[in-house]
Amino acid sequence: MSTESMGAGAAGPYFFLSYAHTPSDGVDDSDPNLWVRRLYRDLCGHITNMTTVSGDRAGFMDGSMRTGQDWPTSLAESLAACRVFVPLYSPRYFISPWCGKEWAVFSRRQALYQGEKRSGMPSAVVPALWSPVRDNQLPQQVRSVQYAHPELGQRYQMFGLYGLVKVRSFRADYERAVLHLARRIVEVGETVMVEPGDHRHLDAVDDAFAPEIAVPSPTGRTLRITVAAGSLDRLPTGRSPVYYGATPLHWNPFHPESAQPLAAIAASIVEGLNYRVVVREFDDKSEASDCPEVLLLDRWVLRDPKHRARLSELDAGHRPSTGLVIPWNSADPTDQAVHNDLAAHLDATLPRAAERERRGGRATALSVPDLRSFRALLPQVVEAAANSYLHSVGASLSGGSTPRFKLGAAGAPAGGPPNWTRPGP
C-alpha cells in the first residue's frame, strides 16, 4: 500500500486520547476526569508548538459517558482518522469495554513506516501510564507494546501521570514527562503512516480486552457461568458505581482487592478444571442450560422487583444443575449494613437454589465475603452442579447408569484434589 493512500492525519486529529472514564460518586458536581483533561490540554499545547497542525486538530478526547452501543459521531470519526493512538494505562482502563473497543478499532488500521526502511513492525500506539498497572493486569493483546518510557523519569514509573499531576512537589516531573510524551507522539506521527479507518460500522466491534468466553477443553466438557448483576446504567439502589461496569459481566464485587471482573476470575478457575467455559448475562431469555451451570448473583439486584421476579421464575423452574454463588465485600461498610436485609430477599426469591447449597454442605457459597473464599468455594459448587447434571442425564437414559464425575486433571489419581489455576487478583 502506498503512503499516498494513508494520509489519515490530514483530516483527523494528530492524536486520540483513549482513557477510562471515572464515574461520578454523586456526592458533588466535581469533574472526576479533571486531571485527564489537564493532561490532554498540556499535550495539545506541546503538539501545536511542535508541528504545523492547528490547535483544533492537535488531539481528540471524548468527554461523554457512553452506554449501550452509543458511539458519538465525533469519536468514531476521530478514531478512524487520527495519526497516533494514546491509551492511558490504569487498572480501570483494562476492564473498560469502551477502551477495549477503541483499541480494537485502531488496531485494525494498517500501519507502515514513511521514508527510509526500518526493521520491525510499525505501530502508531503510544501508551502512557496514568496510574501503575501490574503485569498480570495487562491483557495478552497489549503485553508486547512498550509503555515504560524510562526517559519520562523514575517518579513517572512509580506514580504514573496521575500521581505526578496531583502532588505539587512533583510538578517539574509532570511537566518533563508530558513534554517527553508529546515528543514521542510527534516522532511516531511523523514516521508512521496509518491507513484511514471505517467509522460507519463500529457498533459490532469487539472489546479487545474482554476475557475469552469459550475455550477448548481436552475433555469436551462445557460449563456455563451466568452473571446476574447490576451495571452502570442499571445501578442497584444504594450501591456505589465503583463495583460496576458497562454490563453485568464487568461486575467486580471485590474492588479494590481485585482489578478483574468476577466473571473473568471465575472463567479462569473453571478453565483450570478442564472445562470449556461459556459466560453470559442473566436475562429474560436465560433458559435451562444443556450443561452444568453456575449462577453468580449480585445480591444487591434483589432490591429490584423486576430482577426478583425473573430470578423467582428461574428458581421455580427446578434447575438442580445450576449452582449458586453469592459474593459480597466484607471490607465495604455499605455491604455490611444491609447484610441481613439482602439475605432475607435471597430466601424469598431463590429458596430452592439456596436450599440445595445448604443441603449439600455449601451454605458458605450463599455469602462469600472475599476473593480468597470465592476461589476456594467455586470448585466445590462446580463439582456439585456437574454431578447433578450427569445424574439427570443418566436418569433420562433407559437402562443407563450415571458415570462417576471426577474433577481432577486428566490422569490425576481418583479422589485427589482438583487441579485448578488461580487467576491474578
Image: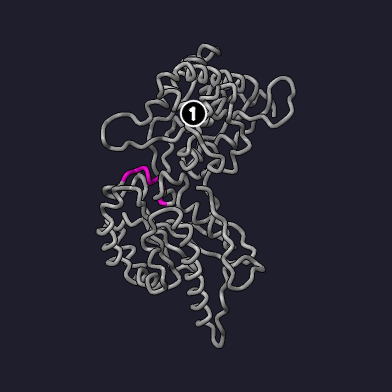
Residue 77 visible to an observer of this rendering: no
Whether residue 243 appears in magenta in the rendering, the answer is yes
x and y percent of residue 346 in the render? 30, 63
x and y percent of residue 228 in the render? 38, 57
Q: Who is closer to the viewer here, 163 or 268?
A: 163
Give the residue at x 55% y 41%: 138
Quadrant location of the N terminus in the rendered image:
top right
x and y percent of residue 402 in the render? 55, 81
Instruction: Give the residue furthest to the bottom.
Output: 399
Give the side of residue 144 with respect to residue 359, left or right.
right
385 above or below 378?
below
The number of numbered discs placed on residues in the rendered structure image is: 1
x and y percent of residue 320 in the render? 42, 73
SS at mark 1?
helix
Dividing the picture into quarters, in which one does residue 194 lie? top right
Query: What residue sits right under mark 1 in the picture?
Result: 160
Dividing the picture into quarters, in which one does residue 41 lie? top left
Give the residue at x 47% y 47%: 260
Residue 96 visible to an observer of this rendering: yes
Give the side of residue 144 with respect to residue 170, left or right.
right
Figure colour scheme: one colour
Q: Amino acid at mark 1?
A: Gly
Give the residue at x 41% y 43%: 256
Whether residue 234 appears in magenta in the rendering, the answer is no
Q: For label 1, count other residues whose C-alpha is less than 10 Å away and answer few (under 14), some (14-19) or many (20+).
A: many
User: In the image, which residues are magenta?
Assistant: 240-248
Q: Who is closer to the viewer here, 159 or 193?
A: 159
Give the residue at x 53% y 43%: 209
Give the side of residue 410 with respect to residue 397, left or right.
right
